[in-house]
Image: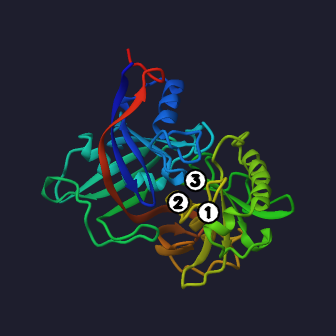
Amino acid sequence: MKQHNIPYLFMRGGTSRGPYFNARDLPSDRDALTEVLLSVIGAGNPRNIDGLGGGNAVTNKVAILSPSETPDADVNYFFAQVGVEERLVDYSPTCGNILVGVGPAAIEMGLVPVAGAVTPVRIRAVNTGALVEAEVLTPGGAVSYEGDTAIDGVPGTAAPVALNFLDVVGSRTGALFPTGQPIDEIAGIEVSCVDVAMPMMIARAADLGITGYETQDELDAMPELFQRMEAMRLEAGRRMGLGDVTKSVTPKIGLIAPPRAGGHFTARYFMPWNTHPTLAVTGSQCLAACALAPGTVAEGIARPAGGSPVNMVIEHPMGQMEVRVKYDDSDGFQFHSAGVTRTARLLARGWVCVPQSVWRPE
């Protein structure tokens, strides 16, 4: 029996990568879509040997694009996090790194026309409702991928993609502090439950018995740490109004420590069942908000940032990430917007094949 061929772009967005699809080429039924994505990635095997996955959470991500139905956006971006060893697809979070590739992909797919040397693409992140404007370099009427912008965690340089996140506070819960306070105590540990671009449970690394400067491999070799953090995360999810998050990757986990290389603070970001090799774009905004807001676990750890706007520099396992933040603290803390500059690259284009036993379009 023949396989079914699905058109796709294979792209790196920031420090993640995965297939990008046009929604019209995928099943609209959620259960059928899940089976297709599991097959595409090859989930259920540590090497994802029977699919496009890379055996790591940052390489098992999927972007699904469609034209926007509302005038405030050009394109809808629906994100799926596909499991590695587990046959699981989580549609609850979004991904800011994969988002970096959405503007270029939308232009490549013909969903957004080129508008000159720089093409603005207004993106609605369907999973969270956030609105983001991307600025994509399009000299000569096509997306440019070559340039001199470097980001930590990716070798070489590429063309910059500027992202401005417009409505990120309370992305899932409707509040900056979903529990109603900047600090909660869970299992004897102080945490800040923050929802900016991505709901997170943030704690001081030292309170969990580590320095916060460990490498990704060192942290991933600490099963007791992950067991302890997971129990806390489940309780944090309940308190944040997210319900039972046992099978969900949100809220994510962040651990903070003082800076060592001139940044504002150091962070280790968890996805949540393993360590992110660098730092998520969405997570960077949430961590920046935690560092700026008074009374959180970051108080006394993060270096003072000064007035708005500010470029917050967050140190991570492979370098630094800079987040441009506008905020107001004249009458209580208000987080207005965040921006980052990242890179993306088209790696391949073509058709990915799924068995007709998985999906056979009518």
Query: Are the residues at dot 3 and dot 2 in contact (C-beta closer than 8 Å)?
Result: yes
Who comes first in sequence, dot 3 or dot 2?
Answer: 3
**Residue under circle 1?**
269
Q: Is residue 129 above or below residue 362?
A: below
| Image coordinates for residue 266, horizontal then vertical, percent | 61, 75
- In whole angstroms, how far apart are the C-alphas of marks 3 and 2? 10 Å
Q: Where is 314 relative to 140, above or below?
A: below
Tag 2 residue: 280
Residue located at (67% from left, 71% from top)? 256
- The residue lying furthest to the top in this view is 362
Q: Which residue is mark 3?
A: 198
Q: Position of residue 9 (x, y in %)?
A: 33, 44
Q: Does residue 332 appear in the picture of this structure? A: no
* 272 lies left or right of 160: right
Q: Is residue 77 visible?
A: yes
Task: Give the image quarter of residue 89.
Answer: top right
Residue type at mark 1 is Tyr
Residue displayed at 76% across by 57% down: 229
Q: Residue at x 34, y 55 (%)?
A: 134
Looking at this rendering, what residue extends furthest in the left direction?
140
Which quarter of the rendered picture does the C terminus lie within? top left
Q: Quadrant of residue 224?
A: bottom right
* Image quarter of the N terminus: top left
Colouring chosen for the image of the structure = rainbow
Three-letter residue code for mark 3: Met
Real-space Cα separation, disc 1 to disc 3, in angstroms: 12 Å
Residues tagged 1 and 2 counted as in contact (Cβ below 8 A): yes
Nearest to N terminus: mark 1 or mark 3: 3
Q: Secondary structure at mark 1?
A: strand
